[in-house]
Image (cartoon, grey):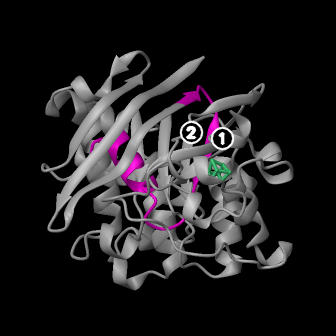
Amino acid sequence: MLLLDIIHLKTQFPTQDGMVKAVDTVDLQIAEGERIGLIGETGCGKTVLGMSIVRLLQPSTTIEGRILYRGRDILQLNDEEMRRLRGKEISMILQNPTTSLNPVLKIGDQIAEAIQLHQKLGKREAKSKAVEMLESVNIPDAQRRADQYPHELSGGMKERVMIAMGLACDPSFVVADEPTKGLDAKTKMQIIDLLREATAHKSLLMITHDLGVAQAICDRIAVMYAGELLEDASSRLILEEPIHPYMQGFINSLPSRGLMPIPGTSPSLIAPPPGCRFHPRCSRATKICERRHPEMVEVEKGHYVRCLLCA
Ligand code: SF4
């Protein structure tokens, strides 16, 4: 059953250099219990897509399109309706715990605050639920840790606190933004295991630039480039039989596949290249790729690709 239906989503924000088209006409469906990895290079628009779903964007941002959650358009909700939905039904595990956690508030109180906002619990009960949440994300000595400030915790523990906070009100749908960024290999594996277990019966949009993280947790992977989706398929198909030249290059750039980087750099989101946005870096580009913008097409059941070679 469909849980989230993103239809022709466009998210833009102004800068001194012009309008940044961070999300440009994205369509994405997420079913109940489905876990999707949204991968792409830094600055391709994936975090802005996640922030658009939970509507945590600067007031100057403009959003067009529809985001239907259980058939209800999130973009049409007023602030109070959105606050009620956020946390309780939909939550976001924000990137970078060091800046996302309040440095002057004990971690137990920060989680309890989120719980109190959405559940009719008194302060004491909310605090004890916060300790339970810390235990559930495997923080040892949770009672004592709840009374500590963020700076007293390691990077891995802070990430666990972010996960505890994101899951505190038992949401049906979670957006997790780069939850393993900056962690050492051992802690990263622990966080992957924790997220896999904690979201086993939820829908998840996992934003990451790390294909290994997406593969370890997600059923499906959607690939984003310059504000657009380029390929969307099951994790197995994307990894074993990628079709889009960008995705093939992305896989070849992994250490396990020969470490061959894609030449060139990601394009500007203010003035992306005409035609296919990947054409300046694509080894298979022809003249027509410079002029014609490819549409997403279903090349086989459940495998979508945006490339003129597939049109
Ligand atoms: Fe490459 Fe052309 Fe396909 Fe774009 S449309 S990915 S430039 S072959």
Q: Along the horizontal axis of the image, is 253 left or right of 116?
A: right
CA gap between label 2 and label 1 equals 5 Å
Residue 43 found in image quarter: bottom left
Residue 97 found in image quarter: bottom left
Mark linked to residue 308: 1
Comes first in the chain, label 2 or label 1: 2
Q: Position of residue 202 (x, y in %)?
A: 58, 35
Choose between 44 and 140: the one closer to the eye.
44
Q: Position of residue 184 (x, y in %)?
A: 63, 82
User: Which range of residues does the magenta coloring cover?
Assistant: 29-57
Looking at mark 2, is its residue's CB closer than 8 Å to ligand 1?
yes
Q: Secondary structure at mark 2?
A: loop
Q: Along the horizontal axis of the image, is 245 left or right of 230?
A: right
Q: Residue at x 29, y 60 (%)?
A: 110
**Residue that mark 2 sits on:** 294
Q: Position of residue 277 (x, y in %)?
A: 51, 54
Choose between 163 and 252: the one closer to the eye.
252
Name the quarter where the N terminus is drawn.
top right
Cβ–Cβ under 8 Å for marks 2 and 1: yes
Residue 181 position (above or below residue 236): below
Looking at mark 1, is its residue's CB closer than 8 Å to ligand 1?
yes
Q: Residue at x 59, y 25 (%)?
A: 32
